Amino acid sequence: MQLLGHRNIKNTLVYTQLITFEDDDYVCKAASNVKEAAELIEAGYEYVCDMETVKLFRKIDKEGSKKQCISDTK
């Protein structure tokens, strides 16, 4: 409660009930070199992990398109 500065738990509960926790859909892309990774970061993607020889990035899908992982690597 100290983080929000509330003295009473009832005040904190008012704010926490206003938040909706929904599963976000992500667009995922893979980068195999530094140039591709830099382009993804500049486009708003965030680094997730390494897998085999590529780095995976994700970005919240605001358009609501299908969940799909796109790889530019061959």
Image: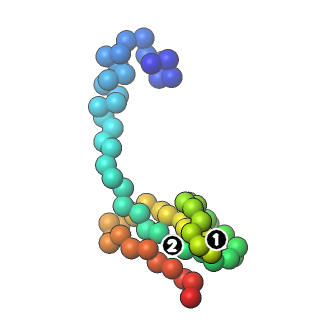
Vertical comparison of 47 with 15: above or below? below
The colour style of the image is rainbow
> Residue 74, located in which quarter of the rendered image?
bottom right
Amino acid on which disc 1 is placed: Ala
| Spatial CA span between label 1 and label 2 | 9 Å
Vertical comparison of 18 with 43: above or below? above
Vertical comparison of 16 with 51: above or below? above
Vertical comparison of 58 with 31: above or below? above
Residue 35 in the image, given as x and y percentages of width and height: 69, 76
In the displayed structure, does residue 19 sit left or right of residue 45? left
Residue linked to disc 2: 29
Q: Residue furthest front?
A: 52
Residue 37 in the image, given as x and y percentages of width and height: 64, 71
Numbered circle sitting on residue 37: 1
In the displayed structure, does residue 73 sit left or right of residue 13? right
Q: Give the structural element (helix, strand or loop) at label 1.
A: helix
Crowding near the residue tagged with mark 1, few <14, some 14–19, many ≥20 C-alpha atoms within 10 Å? many
> Residue 51, located in which quarter of the rendered image?
bottom right
